[in-house]
Image (spheres, grey):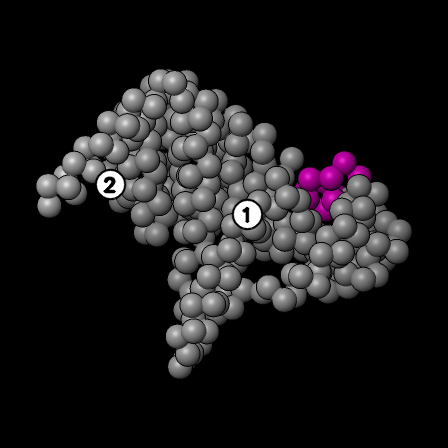
Amino acid sequence: MAINDNILIKIRDMKESLTPVEKLVAEYVLENLEEIPHLSIKSLAQLTKTSDASVLRFCKTMGYKGYRNFIVSISASIGSMDDEQKDQYTDIQPGDDLSIIISNISRNNSKSIEDTLSVIDKNEIARAVKVLRESSRIVFFGIGASGLVCIDAEQKFSRINKMCHSYTDGHSQLTNATLLDKSDVAIFISNSGSTIEIIESLDIVKKNGATVIAITKYNKSELAEKADIVLSISTPEVTIRSGAMGSRIAMLTVIDILFAGVASAEYKKVKKYLSKTHDIIASIKHRK
């Protein structure tokens, strides 16, 4: 169950990882939104040159039991389209005024968080918090911008006295993946879900029996398919100019949710650690 379900965002994010036939249906839906709620499954199959079974398979891939459930969700999402159109992602443009840059980047970051709430599963978050609370050790794996999110995660969970570490290059990831066991949790952070170094470490971790949590874009990537728990994010990077801004903000938000979930559930136990770490930093600042 997504926190704030929007099927249009799910279709947009998952489109490129669908089968060729499912992609035909996805593209037609996105390009003909107004007429979709009025079409029967047979009509949609004919218009997309597919079959009833292919349309039904597409609906199930998107998380719906049947065509009727899918159409109801489409109708609900279309109702919010006016707001969506006013709030599109905006790319960096040459010579933008600073006030425009401030507005665009702020809106893009806010939209990354809002769209992520449309695809992330509340039940998966609950499962992730549970295994993190029960783990002996938490290990974060990520490359590049995702590696920066790993470092942030390590800093947060260390504050509540959780044994954890982040690994942000291929060699250290492979080495430390071999040391994990069934009592550990490995969190793999990757927007694409197909980074070679990540997949190589993932396979080792799976063989060792550690629980795997994936924080990755909503699609059918190898990481998402192999993970025990998948926390999806929604962050279309507009072009190469934008870098990994949107995905980084969404990933940091998911880490914050996990940290707050664990800290809240164990508040009586971790309160003293939060106080100690806060006090020592405050005392250093005061001496300066």
For numbered disc 1, what is the local secondary structure?
A: helix
Q: Residue, x 74% and y 44% (percent of image)? A: 59
Q: Residue at x 70, y 63 (%)?
A: 82
**Res. 272 image quadrant:** top left
Q: Residue at x 10, y 41 (%)?
A: 287
Label at residue 107: none
In the rendering, at what x and y percent does residue 179 appear? 28, 25
| Front label number (2 vs 1) | 1
Residue 160, compared with residue 167, is above or below; it is above
* Residue that protrudes farthest toward the left in the picture: 287
Query: Of all residues shown, which one is farthest toward the bottom?
Result: 95
Residue 77 makes an appearance in the image: yes
Mark with earlier residue (2, 1): 1
Label 2 sits on residue: 171
Residue holding disc 1: 116
Quarter holding residue 26: bottom right
Numbered range of the magenta stretch = 57-67
Residue 206 placed where, x, y %?
41, 27
Is residue 81 shown in magenta? no
Which residue sits at x=52%, y=46%? Answer: 233
Percent coordinates x, y for residue 160 in the rendering: 32, 27
Which secondary structure, mark 2?
A: helix
Q: Residue 117: x, y in percent?
A: 57, 45
Of residue 285 and residue 228, the one placed in the foreground of this image is 285
* Placement of 287 over or under 76, stated as above or below: above
